[in-house]
Amino acid sequence: MAEVYRGFKETQVPNLTNEQIDELAQNYAVGYCSSILEKPRPIDIDDFMEFYLGLEVEVHFLSHNGMYLGVTVFEDTDFFPIYNLFKNQAEFISVKGGTVIIDELQDRGYEPRTRFTKAHECGHFIMHKDFFQGSSICLYSKCESAIIADDLKVIERQADRFAAGLLMPRDAVIDMSKRMWRYGYEDDEIVYCIQETFNVSRQAAEYRLKDLDLIG
Ligand SMILES: [Zn+2]
C-alpha cells in the first residue's frame, strides 16, 4: 500500500502538491486493482473502502437539507450528530473511528457523484488523520460558505484532487487522451469517454482533463 507523504507544516495540513496527490491516488488505485492503468475501468469504490482501506461505511441523514455530502470519522465517538427524518429532530449516535458516513440524500442520488464523495472521504482518511486529530470529524460540505478557514479549504481541495486521481488515475487518463488525439477526437468526445470509462460525472471528467492540461 502506498505511503502517505508526511511533510506536514505546523498546521498539520499535509504539504502535498497536486502532482504528489495524483501519484498517491494512482498508487492506491493500482494497489487495489493492478491492471487499472492498462485496462481502464471504474474502481469499485465500496469494495475499495471496505476491504482495501478497512473503513466502515454507513448511510445517515447528516442534516435536514443535504448540506453535508459525507463525513469521515477518525476517532470513536458516542456523540455524532445526525438528523432523524422520522422524528424530524437531531440526535446523537455512536460511531467507530475509521467510519465514513454518506448522506442518505446523496446516497440515493446520481451514482457518479456518490462515488466521488466516497473517494473524497477516502482522501481525507488517507491524508488528513493528523489534521483532524482531536477534532475527530471532517465534514464534507457542499455549502461553500460553511468552509471558512483557509486550512479547511486546502484540505477540501486536496481531498477532491485525491478523489479525481483515484477514480481517474493520471497515467490512464493521459494514455486515453493521447490515443484519442491521434485519431482526431474533439475535447468533448474525450470528456465523454473519460466519463463513461470511469463512471464519473461529466463535470468531474472535464475538471480532471483540464487539471492535467489535456483539454483546453
Ligand atoms: Zn472533505
Image (cartoon, helix red, strand yellow):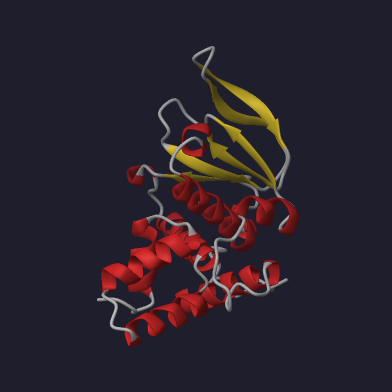
- Residue found 38% across the figure and 42% down from its top: 146
Q: Quadrant of the N terminus?
A: bottom right
**Extreme front residue here?**
183
148 sits to left or right of 39 = left
- Residue found 55% across the figure and 56% down from its top: 119
- Residue 39 higher or lower than 67, as above or below: below
Q: Kindly tell me whether residue 17 is visible in this rendering.
A: no
Q: Quadrant of residue 209?
A: bottom left
Q: Position of residue 126 (x, y in %)?
A: 63, 61
- Residue 70 higher or lower than 128, as above or below: above
Q: Quadrant of the C terminus?
A: bottom left
Number of marks in picture: 0
**Extreme top residue here?**
87
Q: Quadrant of residue 102?
A: top right
- Residue found 50% across the figure and 50% down from its top: 117
187 sits to left or right of 52 = left
Viewer-nearest residue: 209 or 153: 209
Q: Position of residue 27 (x, y in %)?
A: 63, 74
Viewer-nearest residue: 85 or 43: 43
Viewer-nearest residue: 97 or 120: 120
- Residue 159 higher or lower than 170, as above or below: above
Q: Kindly tell me whether residue 125 is visible in this rendering.
A: yes
Q: Position of residue 134 (x, y in %)?
A: 65, 48
- Residue 11 higher or lower than 79, as above or below: below
